[in-house]
Amino acid sequence: MPEFDAFDSGVEPGGLLSRSDIKLLLCYLLSSMNAPLTGAMISDCLLEDGLANYFEVGQALSALVANGNIMKADRDGEIYYCVSESGRHIAKTLETSLPLIIRQKAVRCAIRLLYLEQNRRDTKVEITRQDAGYSVTCAILEGDAPLISVTLTVPDKLAAEEIKANFLEAPAECYQQLLETLTGKRKIFG
């Protein structure tokens, strides 16, 4: 029976209440992703579904870095974390001690966040205040040059932020639908 030694504030039923389990999940997450994640991304992965307490995640991350299980590096002024060989070994050896659903939720969230980060690098969205509301310019970039750029005018900031979020969630689909519509190569009914 695991020792419940972690704060439970913000933790959903079935979430992690053991500090060692939180550390293990962090090693497992970074090992599974095989890609560096920011501290914010790591926190989001564990907080989104109430898998662990915010403060416990921060303490676990710091402890794993101090122990050499997780390494941190500065990339363009932002700190990224990746698993070391010792952390990878811990994850591989002990991963089945964590419930499958907990592991799946954390990895699913990390995949989504990495996808969004890639979209942010390959896109540009600008929101500008206008007399008649806000203009939202959404662009897909090829290098630094826009491959396609579309500007919409919306009545308020909330609508502009929603367009930005939806575009960043699926820029390829937006591009495909726009291209199909403009070239006349779209399906009319399903």
Image (tube, rainbow, N blue to C red):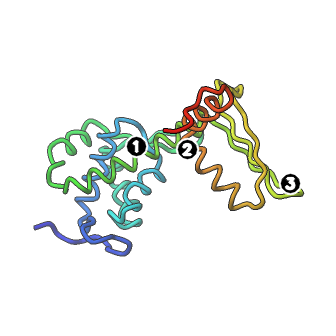
Q: Is residue 85 above or below residue 13?
A: above
Q: Residue furthest left?
A: 1
Please state which of the two labelled residues, at mark 3 or mark 2, is closer to the viewer. Answer: 3
Residue 143: x %, y % from top left: 65, 24
> Is 9 situated left or right of 28 in this image?
right
Instruction: Say which residue label 2 marks.
Output: 78
Residue under the point 38% across and 41% down: 71
**Badge 1: few (under 14), some or many (20 or more) residues near its Cα, within 10 Å?**
some
**Mark 1 element type:** helix
**Badge 2: few (under 14), some or many (20 or more) residues near its Cα, within 10 Å?**
few
Residue 140: x %, y % from top left: 65, 32
Mark 3 and mark 1: Cα distance apart in space? 36 Å
Instruction: Say which residue label 1 marks.
Output: 111
How many marks the image carries: the answer is: 3
Mark 2 and mark 1: Cα distance apart in space? 19 Å
Residue 113: x %, y % from top left: 46, 46
